[in-house]
Image: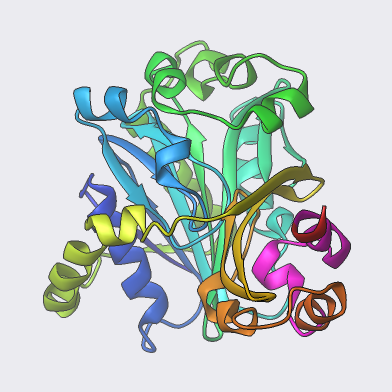
């Protein structure tokens, strides 16, 4: 296993480096990539930026807004948050617990009571300290997540606008009540730098990992172009089409919103949004819906041809149909 760490703190740079690492055919084997963000909100690939953040607060506090390549929900990150990305060959065993087991091992070695919970979370003493998501590129998978070490929880609560469906389903009134900082659980016995250094040492000792410098000279030209696009409004906000029909629900495997237009009995435009944990880019399958008859049988046929685990994070065909047909 190779371990890379970048000193860059803009999500446009850090996430672009991650993308270049997974796309690089010469980067084989297991990789652990570590990075931090100075003051940022990262939304999931299929989320609506306008709905997920409190834009006035984000702009007033100069918080960078970025969209990642994986699914899942929005997160606020500052230098009290540590991000990790596992990059490895995809063997159709992309479960989160597989990747998080060594992270849990590290946290437990510090005397914490860490455990895997739900779809993609890590808890410490019953409170969330980590959320995770994945995406696949070619024969490689990225499983990346956060570790709330000493995040400004006030900014976290003020910057995000969580779906009422999610809050209602959990029976809890706010984001802030559901999370904790690792530093607090450790009684502030470690600094953020000491925590990261110990994390690297844990992987070197227990997984035979080797710390290496990122090959930035190799990537620089491509990185500059990619950063420009990933920082653009086109990528972050997507195009906005006026939709006539919208339906949304929270299912076991996440929130899904369907927006669509029907013209002369045919589906004209369709858009899927939400925090569902897609591993592949949903844009790749959108043409399958364009122009089909707006009938249950036709929708069923299209949905039956799609790997719903890859594109909808396990939300079922019946659940998706219910949003189209009511």
Q: Is residue 5 visible?
A: no
Q: For the view shown, which residue lies furthest in the top direction?
A: 187
Q: Nearer the viewer, residue 290 or 6?
A: 290
- Image position of 299 (left or right of 108): right
Name the dominant secondary structure of the magenta segment.
helix
Where is residue 205 drawn, in percent x and y?
53, 54
Q: Nearer the viewer, residue 220 or 196?
A: 220
Eyeballing the image, is 237 above or below 94? above
Scheme of colours in the image: rainbow
Residue span colored magenta: 304-323
- Image position of 71 (left or right of 77): right
Eyeballing the image, is 290 above or below 177? below
- Image position of 3 (left or right of 139): left
The number of numbered discs placed on residues in the rendered structure image is 0
Query: Is residue 312 highlighted in magenta?
Result: yes
Query: Is residue 291 highlighted in magenta?
Result: no
Eyeballing the image, is 292 above or below 163? below
Q: Nearer the viewer, residue 222 or 171?
A: 171
Where is residue 281 drawn, in percent x and y?
53, 72
Q: For the view shown, which residue lies furthest in the front direction?
A: 264
Report the residue at 38% width, 27% height from top.
54
Q: Nearer the viewer, residue 94 or 164?
A: 164
Report the residue at 21% width, 73% height from top.
215
Q: Is residue 302 visible?
A: yes
Where is residue 153 drawn, in percent x and y?
44, 17
Report the residue at 78% width, 28% height from top.
169
Report the residue at 71% width, 47% height from top.
254
Eyeballing the image, is 71 above or below 267? above
Where is residue 311 drawn, in percent x and y?
65, 70
């Amino acid at each position: 296993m190779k371990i890379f760490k970048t000193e860059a703190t803009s999500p446009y740079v850090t996430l672009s480096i991650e993308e270049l690492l997974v796309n690089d055919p010469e980067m084989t084997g297991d990789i652990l990539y570590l990075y931090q963000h100075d003051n940022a909100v990262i939304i999931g690939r299929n989320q609506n930026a306008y709905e997920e953040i409190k834009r006035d607060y984000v702009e007033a506090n100069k918080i960078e807004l970025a969209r990642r390549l994986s699914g899942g929900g929005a997160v606020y990150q500052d230098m009290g948050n540590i991000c990790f990305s596992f990059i490895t060959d995809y063997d159709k065993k992309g479960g989160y617990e597989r990747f998080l087991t060594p992270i849990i091992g590290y946290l437990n070695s510090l005397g914490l009571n860490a455990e895997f919970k739900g779809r993609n979370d890590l808890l410490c003493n019953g409170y969330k300290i980590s959320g995770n998501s994945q995406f696949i590129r070619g024969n490689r998978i990225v499983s990346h997540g956060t570790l709330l070490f000493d995040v400004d929880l006030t900014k976290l609560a003020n910057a995000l606008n969580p779906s009422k469906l999610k809050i209602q389903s959990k029976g809890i009134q706010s984001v802030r009540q559901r999370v904790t900082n690792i530093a607090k659980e450790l009684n502030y016995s470690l600094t953020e730098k000491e925590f990261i250094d110990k994390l690297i040492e844990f992987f070197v000792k227990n997984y035979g990992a080797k710390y290496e410098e990122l090959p930035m000279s190799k990537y620089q030209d491509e990185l500059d172009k990619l950063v420009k696009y990933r920082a653009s409004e086109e990528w972050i906000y997507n195009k906005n089409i006026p939709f006539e029909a919208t339906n949304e629900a929270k299912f076991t495997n996440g929130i899904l919103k369907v927006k669509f237009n029907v013209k002369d009995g045919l589906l004209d435009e369709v858009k899927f949004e939400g925090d569902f944990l897609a591993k592949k880019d949903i844009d790749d399958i959108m043409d399958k819906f364009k122009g089909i008859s707006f009938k249950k049988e036709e929708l069923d046929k299209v949905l039956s041809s799609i790997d719903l685990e890859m594109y909808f994070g396990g939300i079922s065909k019946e659940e998706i149909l219910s949003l189209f047909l009511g």
